[in-house]
Amino acid sequence: MAQDSAAPRVYMRYSSGGLPRGEAEVQGEVWAAEAAVDAVTGGVHVPYLREVIVFLIAAVAVMPLFHWFRASTVLGYLFIGALIGPHGLKLIAEGVGLSEIGELGVVFLLFTIGLELSWQRLRSMRTYVLGLGGAQVLLCGLALAGIFLLMGLSAPAATIIGFALALSSTAIVTQLLIERGEFAAQPGRIAFSILLMQDLAVVPILVMVSIFSAYAQGGEGVNIFALAGLATLKAAVAVLLILTVGRYLLRWIYGVVARTGNPELFLALSLLAALLTAVATGAAGLSMALGAFLAGLLLSDTEFRPQVETDIQPFKSLLLGLFFISVGLGMDFTVFGDNFVAVLGLIAIFIALKTVLIGLLTFAFGEARLCSLRTGLLLASGGEFAFVVISASASGGVVPLQVAHIVQLAAAISMALTPGLATLGAWLQTRFDGMEGDRERNADALVEGLDAHVIIAGYGRVGRMIGRLLREQQLPFVALDLDPARARAARTRGELVYYGDAARAEVLERVGIAKASAVVVTLDNSVAASHLVRALRAKWPKIPIFARARDREHMLELEAAGASAVVHEALEASLQLSGHVLRAIGAPSDAATTLIERVRTEVYERQIKAEND
């Protein structure tokens, strides 16, 4: 994430500088911590080895407790960092090593997110990324800058701090959404869209830091426009090279490596793809995570995506844990004790302001009030970029060191509050959804940003299962159901499910059938399902229609009505049950699978032949 490796050092170096402790005492604490860890490592001096060993021991000892209480793993890692860090038990005396390694966790996180998306799905989010995300960064940054300006800070310092705190934690919010299964729900999609724009916004913010630092250090002769133009040119060239080279070369290289049949070489290529693009964007002044995201996006539509995602997952999880621990290491509670009111007041101010502004902006973009509130709470806390931006500005003399310490500590504590804020938002939606007429203003506004989505007609047991699989693959969908209680329960989970009759053309038009990629018909009523398929095929002849049939006659009827593919419900249930029986009584698994596939093929082919005859 960080473009300046010295950024975390600024916080660690000065975190004790303003406290009433002598230099000898600080050095003694460092020696004591080193001696304690040496007892574990046997005095072996490998860079960061002791830190990693302490991290692993603490994780094994503490994380099961958080799992037992079903608490967020993010909160657990933050707690571990604060516990073992230089301001806790002092098992780790200095957090720069873990911070630098942990940044790779965010890189791999964004790489896997890029793998799970696609260009088509990303285009469907453009309204939220550019419109809502851009408005959020601008308005929150300016509002917070105005508050710090009123507090007596200089205009450059207030601007830098304001825009730094306007950014949220991509790593924490995204991980929380994945853990909760809400990444593809509406609040999750909106939050991730805004986070993408925030990553892009790091570029101009860092340019501002460079310009203000040049002036603070007596560089009035620096050409502002030349500096900004050079930074923009470097960023554009880096992104263009990644997209061009990746599109025409990356797939070919993966094909060559895959043909070798060497899994270690394939893994090495995946690591290289993520790290090389991250380094390229980092060197251009962009976010390293953004480069990794672009690399994952380029691989998302290739046949290699599932294997790449599987190979990267262990590295992402481990390194992301290191990143959260490194954030916890920076929580200097001695600074918190000396500036108790200032830290808590700052946290309250920017969390409340961001919640309100993001909620209002999201509501203005057509979302429901409770969905807007959940999005605001998800993104209300500070982010990892605050450490980078504030540290760089403190090194450049733009932000006073004491102010930088307070702002960074407030950002770190607010990041630890993110799981609680997310839980609060979910509780509020569950508690108040449907009250006081807080229904969506209309389906047109809510699905306006969707493109290439799936429409599910009927959200019973089959429809819910299809929706779950689509959510896990981050594929957008809209569902229609005539049971208002069922639709309301799904809405409390953040799913786009509406009360409506899918057989009516005007209802389908309001949920964006013109831009939909497919329609899935799961209605229990056989007559209604056949009527719907026939109506869909007559009005939208090119859209793929997938339907379930209750029996053989219904299957033939749906196929005659124009369904692209029909699944025989009774047949599939019988085949799956037969497979379990065959395996239970000792039949070889491969033989049972082959037999089931043969019977399935014969039945479907026989029914198609009977229909044609």
Image (spheres, grey):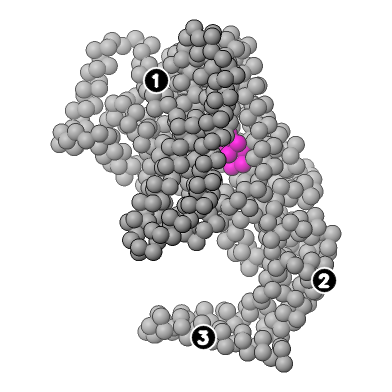
342 vs 430, left or right, is left
Q: Residue 598 has which mark? A: 3
Q: State the image coordinates of residue 3 (x, y, percent, origin top left).
A: 45, 29
Looking at the rendered image, the quarter that the C terminus falls into is bottom right
Residue found 20% across the figure and 30% down from its top:
36
Mark 1, residues whose alpha carbon is within 10 Å: few (<14), some, or many (≥20)? many
Residue of label 1: 10
Residue 370 seen in render = no
Q: Earlier in the sequence, mark 1 or mark 2?
A: 1
Mark 3, residues whose alpha carbon is within 10 Å: few (<14), some, or many (≥20)? few
Q: Earlier in the sequence, mark 1 or mark 3?
A: 1
Q: Earlier in the sequence, mark 3 or mark 2?
A: 2
Report the amino acid beneath label 3. Answer: Arg
611 vs 348, left or right, is right
Tell me how far mark 3 sits from mark 2, CA to CA.
34 Å
Q: State the image coordinates of residue 211 (x, y, percent, origin top left).
A: 54, 17
Residue 475 seen in render = yes
Q: State the image coordinates of residue 502 (x, y, percent, origin top left).
A: 78, 64
Image position of 69 with respect to 604: above or below: above
541, 497: nearer the viewer:
541
Report the amino acid beneath label 2. Answer: Ala
Residue of label 2: 538
Residue numbers of the magenta segment: 192-199
Report the amino acid beneath label 1. Answer: Val
